[in-house]
Image (cartoon, grey):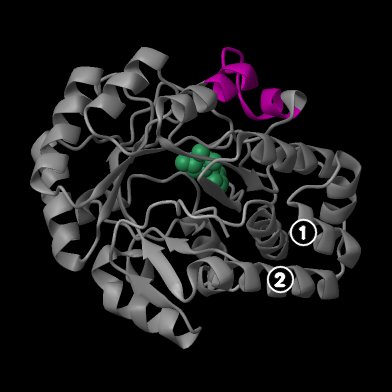
Amino acid sequence: MKEYIQKLQEEHSLTKEEFAALVSCRDESVYDFARQQAVKTRRRIYGQDVYIRGLIEISSYCKNDCYYCGIRRSNKKASRYRLTHSQILDCCREGYNLGFRTFVLQGGEDSHFTDQTLTAIIRDVKAGYPDCAVTLSLGERSRESYEKLYAAGADRYLLRHETASEEHYQRLHPKGLSLKNRKECLWNLKEIGFQTGAGFMVGSPGQTAECLADDLLFLRELSPQMVGVGPFLRHQDTPFADQPDGSLEMTLFLLSLIRLLLPKALLPATTALSALHPDGRKLGILAGCNVVMPNLSPAAVRKKYLLYDHKPATGLEAAESIDLLKKQMKEIGCQVVCDRGDYPAADF
Ligand code: 5AD
């Protein structure tokens, strides 16, 4: 297996069979080797730097009904909220004062947020904070819509592909949602000029080694600037309430492989990783991640944006804890950087 890791490091890809064999591996010494190589790669490109993004969860309304997600339409127990234009700007002001230079506006697919509403928000954020990047994470929209959001000044867009296997996609989503459309959105975003993020959950119900191999091959093909990968975590009021959570070790292993696959990728240690383990964030960085996304949402709504059970919203996940975060990163030889942290243009 170590040869495959070496090959991945040198050639930045493997065949589907090789990827499937690698992700089937349960050997801790292979995980260690992948981790070491991933951290070496991160250091070669980013040195000690870790980037921060302020996450603003703008709406917990969603028209979709994904089986894994706590804010799915059918979850009648979810308490719903949406932030107003001025609440979002308030979050940015607070974030800016804390040192954030990227704001991520994330939410369910909420028809309240029309192109007009969003472009007005994006323009105001960019006018108020011209040295900041705006990232959107608002699901599937038409190409025309994405074009308008980009023209208004949005810089980046996160849209996890969730799984690159057609069959597995159907297992996770109700009819009406398709992998084909998801991929089309991602290609559109990239073509328009967004720094684009794809990604998936590790250990989602029905996921096989072949699914993960397809995920890695799809990431290779798309070559996104950002990759969001975290463990699947059950939510009690979803059809997957009784499914086991994804594993910490597997998630960290996948993160290391992605660092070798896409060396320059902006790769966050996700909130879900912190939910799974109290040191999840540190462990993520030590597996090859180089981004953390603390929560900047208003305190009153943080408990409502519950994609999965036990989602942390305070303590170390809160943007106000940035000093603790800096300390934590220092302990592992890293340094929090307060600039936009764009995808590097230079070749390495
Ligand atoms: N566990 C882990 N991640 C989840 N997401 C949604 N529901 C869950 C869950 N139960 C992830 C999806 C989505 C992102 C915003 O959160 O991958 O793209």
Point out the image quarter for the N terminus. Answer: bottom right
Q: Amino acid at mark 1?
A: Glu
In the image, 279 versus 5, the foreground residue is 5
For the residues carrying marks 1 and 2, which lies nearer the camera in this image? 1
Q: Which residue is mark 2?
A: 37
How far separated are the C-alphas under marks 1 and 2? Answer: 11 Å
Query: Would you say 280 lies left or right of 52 here?
Result: right
The residue sitting at 53% across, 25% down in the picture is: 187
Q: Residue furthest bottom?
A: 331
Asked whether residue 129 appears in the rendered view, the answer is yes
Image position, residue 268 (x, y; %): 49, 57
* Residue nearest the observer in this picture, 123 or 140: 123
Residue appearing at x 49%, y 68% in the figure: 46
- Label 1 environment density (alpha carbons within 10 Å; few <14, some 14–19, many ≥20): few
Classify mark 2: helix, strand or loop. Answer: helix
| Lateral position of residue 337 relative to residue 199, left or right | left
Q: Amino acid at mark 2?
A: Gln
Residue 251 at x, y percent in the picture: 66, 58
Q: Is residue 142 visible to the viewer in this orientation of the structure?
A: no
Q: Nearer the viewer, residue 271 or 219?
A: 219
Judge the density around disc 2: few (<14), some (14-19), many (≥20) Cα neighbours within 10 Å: many
The residue range painted magenta reads 168-184
